[in-house]
Amino acid sequence: MGASTRALSLLLLGLLLAFFPGALGTNPGLVARITDKGLEYVAREGLVALQSELYRITLPDFTGDFKINHVGRGRYEFHSLNIRSCELLGSALTPIPGQGLSLSISDSFIWAQGKWKVRKSFLKLQGSFDVQVKGVTILVNLLLGSEPSGRPTVMTSSCSSHIRDVDVDISGDLGWLLNLFHSQIESKFRKILESEICEMVQKSVTSDLQPYLQTLPVTTEIDRFASIDYSLMEAPQATAQMLDVMLKAEFFNHHHRSPVAFLAPVMSLPEEHNRMVYFAISDYVFNTASLVYHEAGYLNFSITDDMVPPTSTIRLTTKSFRAFVPRLARQYPNMNLELQGALVSAPLLNFSPGNLSLAPQMEIEAFVLLPSSTKEPVFRLSVATNVSAMLTFNTSTSKLTGFLKPEEIRVELKESKFGVFNVELLEALLNYYILNTLYPEVNDKLTKGFPLPLLKHIQLYDPVLQIHKDFLFLGANIQYIRV
Ligand SMILES: *[C@@H]1O[C@H](CO)[C@@H](O)[C@H](O)[C@H]1NC(C)=O
Ligand SMILES: *[C@@H]1O[C@H](CO)[C@@H](O)[C@H](O)[C@H]1NC(C)=O
Ligand SMILES: *[C@@H]1O[C@H](CO)[C@@H](O)[C@H](O)[C@H]1NC(C)=O
Ligand SMILES: *[C@@H]1O[C@H](CO)[C@@H](O)[C@H](O)[C@H]1NC(C)=O
């Protein structure tokens, strides 16, 4: 491809991205993976939540007629039923590839108590009863999705519950009579409970689980101008042993969001199952952050003589430059200089196995500060350096933080109105500024870090970090902090 065809295709790509945001950017910036271990944990926590919901079930009263030889007809009523205890035991959350998740609860037990009344012509009797419900199984299929806003959604696509054994124990004067209807009463109980359980599950999914999933911070403000977009790009994908959630994970300037001209890489995630969750955080996340900060002029700087340490052999005055740029000192005697620096482009973070680095390129323009308070450009420098980066996950803040380790800089003269001169003398001054001001500023920002997309009350522990080509792979166990 010739240079002009390349330029044209880049332009076309840029236009396509501007008009159809997301059309080409089909790769997620971040994939959150919940492994079989994670699903096991979620199932256990879900069980605890459902168990407490079960206590809130209000069982309806029910009535029936009886007719017995020598005794005649009558009517019984069971009322004031309430669940005294329940124990949900075995639970499993299994992915159904291409569909969602299946939650199964088996081998559970419910104990309920209530009162009964019998009315037979003028006779009125009452007493209490106990119900032991054994071998309760519940099977719920959950359909996961995503809203246009990028928030996750959940729905029950089916629910069935089955009770193996109902044992009603009736006490009171006429208990013997009701005991004649055991099987009828028990089958009524079974029907009521089976339908109440599924109704409770459905209600709990709609009014507890869905709002909880929506605590996913779809946009998180990082600072006064940067935010991160963690919207879901599609419905979570269930595969045989895990659930993958694909998130956009893009930094943007919240005052004016512009389309990003590069795509997130395709990530091939390692098959690891040691931790409950894994986050594959692509270079896209870091590079969109770099873009936002660069566009906002975050790393633009200016150095003036008052910032030069007293011990420096060179000062930012034309006088100090006399020895090596004599013409500059002659044309502008006894004036101050100012160096204005900026990064040539947003520095990109390079991910190679086990290694993170970046190679920022800076351009520095020197100005003479004229007495008229105008600035006259006099020469331009380019500064190159290789920087290695470290990323860590802070479990107490749930943030990914960074640190840059500075290396030697290489300074070159790009352009000068006063002839070529040796820039080595300026190297020490620039090094001083970069090490003492620029790096601390950047590292201060990086130590603040950015948060991972976590649901409310979720904390990560036992983190492991790996650097792969194009992405960071963070594994951790999760803990739901009960409030
Ligand atoms: C940062 O500096 C560059 C180069 O001097 C300039 O083009 C850019 O406008 C500056 N950005 C801001 C936000 O000041
Ligand atoms: C990491 O990358 C930097 C910059 O490319 C390089 O200097 C360094 O040797 C690399 N380290 C490892 C361990 O590969
Ligand atoms: C940075 O590293 C690259 C590759 O290792 C090397 O070619 C380049 O000279 C280095 N730049 C500086 C400023 O050290
Ligand atoms: C994690 O963040 C907390 C709060 O900002 C800080 O006090 C702590 O030093 C950080 N831990 C590490 C290991 O950086």
Image (spheres, rainbow, N blue to C red):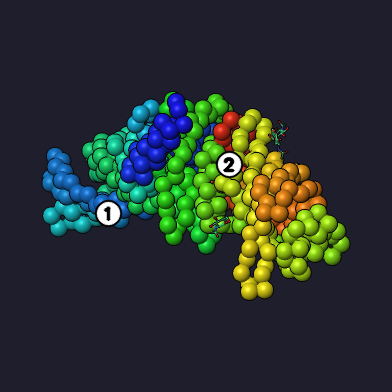
Position in image of residue 41 (x %, y %): 52, 39
Position in image of residue 369 (x %, y %): 67, 67
* Proximity of marks 2 and 1: CB atoms separated by less than 8 Å: no
User: Which of the two marks, 2 or 1, is nearer to us in this view?
Assistant: 2
- N-terminal of the pair, mark 2 or mark 1, is 1
Q: Secondary structure at mark 2?
A: loop
Q: Is residue 16 visible?
A: yes
Say which residue appears at 61% left-offset and 50% top-offset: 343
Toward which corner of the image does residue 385 lie, by quadrant? Answer: top right
**Could you tell whether 451 is left or right of 247 in the image?**
right
Label 2: how many Cα within 10 Å (few below 14, some 14–19, many 20+): some
Inspect the image, locate mark 1, and give the three-letter code of the amino acid beneath it. His
Residue corresponding to mark 1: 79
Look at the picture and state if 420 lies above or below 354. Answer: below
**Could you tell whether 433 is left or right of 36 in the image?**
right
**Badge number at residue 348:** 2
Picture quarter with the N terminus: top left
Toward which corner of the image does residue 187 lie, by quadrant? Answer: top left
Say which residue appears at 76% left-offset and 63% top-offset: 330
Inspect the image, locate mark 2, and give the three-letter code of the amino acid beneath it. Leu
Image quarter for ligand 2 equals top right
Say which residue appears at 35% left-offset and 39% top-offset: 16
**Could you tell whether 391 is left or right of 92 in the image?**
right
- Label 2 residue near ligand 2, CB within 8 Å: no
Label 2 and label 1: CA atoms lie apart by 70 Å
Look at the picture and state if 380 lies above or below 390. Answer: below
- Label 1 residue near ligand 4, CB within 8 Å: no
